[in-house]
Image (cartoon, rainbow, N blue to C red):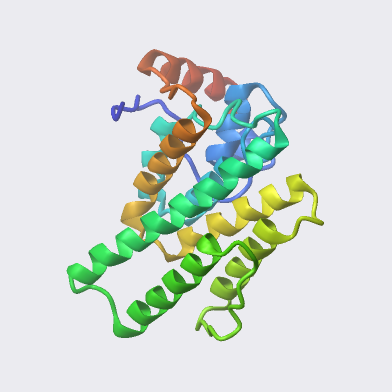
Amino acid sequence: MNNVPDVMPFLSGGGHNDPKSGACFMEMESFLAGEKWGADLQCAHPSLRAMAISVNDRCTDERRQELVHLLGRTINTRLEDKNENFRIALELCYWAFERFFELGQRARSEGSLHDATDFTLKQMQEVFNLIKESPEPPFIGNYVFPHPLVTEMFRMILSAKFDNALHIVTRTEALANATARLVDFIGDKWRPTFLADYFAEYDELAGRTTKVISEQEMAALAEDFSKVSQP
C-alpha cells in the first residue's frame, strides 16, 4: 500500500517526550501497540527496532514520510526463544551487508562512486566475508578504515558472533545496533526501500506472514493519534 491518508501524523526525527511534541517511527509503533510511549518497543525484535530508529533519524523529512506505510511491521516480532532471536539478528546482519554491497555495486556501475569510497567498500566486503565465513574470530587488525564508525561496527559484530561468554540477549542487541549503523553509509533515496526489504527479510526468516496496515486502519490510527497529540 503506497497511498497514505492525508491525515496521517507527520513522522519526525529524534525522540519525543509525548505525542504532543511529535512522533518518530518507533514511537508511533508504541502507540499502535498500546505500549508505553517511546522508541523502545518491548515487543519488537531488537534488529527491527534498531534499524527503524536508524532509518527514521537519518532520512530527510520528506523521505521519512515514505516509512508511514510500514507502521505495524515491528509489533510482536520479538520471539520468546532468545536463541532464535539471536539467529535472526545474525542472518539479518548478513542480509543487510550483502544488500549494502549491492547498492555499492550499483553506484559503481553508474560512475557515482569516488575512488576512496570504492576502496573502502572493497575493504569492508573483505572484512565482512572473513567474519561471515570464519568458524573462529578472524584477525582484522590489518584493515584501517577512514571512518572510525566502520571499525567499531565490525568489532561489535565480531564480539556478538563469537564471544559466547556474553549473554545471548546482549549479543543480539549488539548485532542489531551494529547492523543499523550501515544506514549512515546508504544514500537517502535508498533508505525507505532498504527498511522495507529488511522487514520483509525478517518475515521470511521468522516464518511470519507480512501484516500491512489497511487504509481504514491507517485512518483510524491517525484519528486516535490526533486526539492525544493536541496541545
User: As drawn, is 228 to the left or to the right of 184?
Assistant: right
Looking at the rendered image, the quarter that the C terminus falls into is top right
**Image coordinates for residue 2, horizontal then vertical, percent:** 29, 30
| Residue 36 sits in quarter | top right
Q: Does the image show residue 52?
A: yes
Looking at the rendered image, the quarter that the N terminus falls into is top left
Which residue shows up at 33% across the image and 78% down it?
118
| Camera-nearest residue between 16 and 135 | 135
User: Does 146 sit above or below residue 183?
Assistant: below
| Camera-nearest residue between 213 and 131 | 131
| Camera-nearest residue between 114 and 89 | 89
Which residue shows up at 41% across the image and 50% down it?
61
**Image coordinates for residue 115, horizontal then vertical, percent:** 30, 84
User: As drawn, is 78 to the left or to the right of 10?
Assistant: right
| Residue 158 sits in quarter | bottom right
Q: Does the image show residue 50?
A: no
**Image coordinates for residue 42, horizontal then vertical, percent:** 70, 33
Which residue shows up at 27% across the image and 65% down it?
105
User: As drawn, is 135 to the left or to the right of 70?
Assistant: right
Residue that lies at the very extreme toward the left in this rendered image = 110
User: Does 189 sit above or below residue 196?
Assistant: below
